[in-house]
Amino acid sequence: MKKKLTLDLDEKVYQQLLERFEGDENALKEYAVRFLENHSQDLKDKPESDEIKKGLEDYLNKGSAGTRSYGIKGQGW
């Protein structure tokens, strides 16, 4: 089942795309569909939230155990 997606583009970007496809809006739409289909696999491979979580875990694991340096002086435990 096909779904419809409406995109709001900046006028400059729209004009550049329209120029590239020589004013053919149908060709522009087909390009957009193919582009999204080809890049949808990127979303399945590695979600961005996993990358953020891993980065946070790495950051927290870098600190040495037992330190109380949580910011400016006087704000530790």
Image: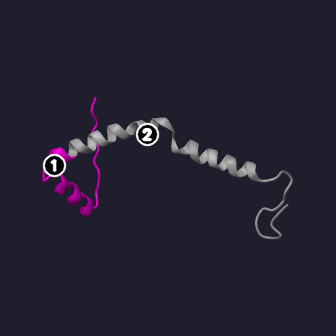
The residue beneath circle 1 is: 25
Image-quadrant location for residue 49? top right
- Specify which label sits upstream in the sequence, 2 or 1: 1
Give me the residue at 65% from left, 49% from top: 56
Q: Which residues are magenta?
A: 1-28
Looking at the image, do the residues carrying marks 2 and 1 touch, with CB atoms under 8 Å apart? no
User: Which residue of the protein is positioned furthest toward the front in this rendering?
Assistant: 20
Quadrant, the C terminus: bottom right
**Label 2 – label 1 distance at C-alpha:** 26 Å
Name the residue: 39% across, 38% down. Answer: 40
Using a 10 Å C-alpha cutoff, classify the residue at mark 2 as few (fewer than 14 neighbours), some (14 to 19) or many (20 or more). Answer: few
Kindly identify the residue that appears in the image at 16 percent across and 49 percent down. 25
User: As drawn, is 75 to the left or to the right of 54?
Assistant: right
Compared to residue 75, the image places residue 26 above or below, namely above
Residue beneath disc 2 = 42
Please state which amino acid type lies under the numbered disc 1: Glu
Horizontally, is 48 left or right of 25 in the view?
right
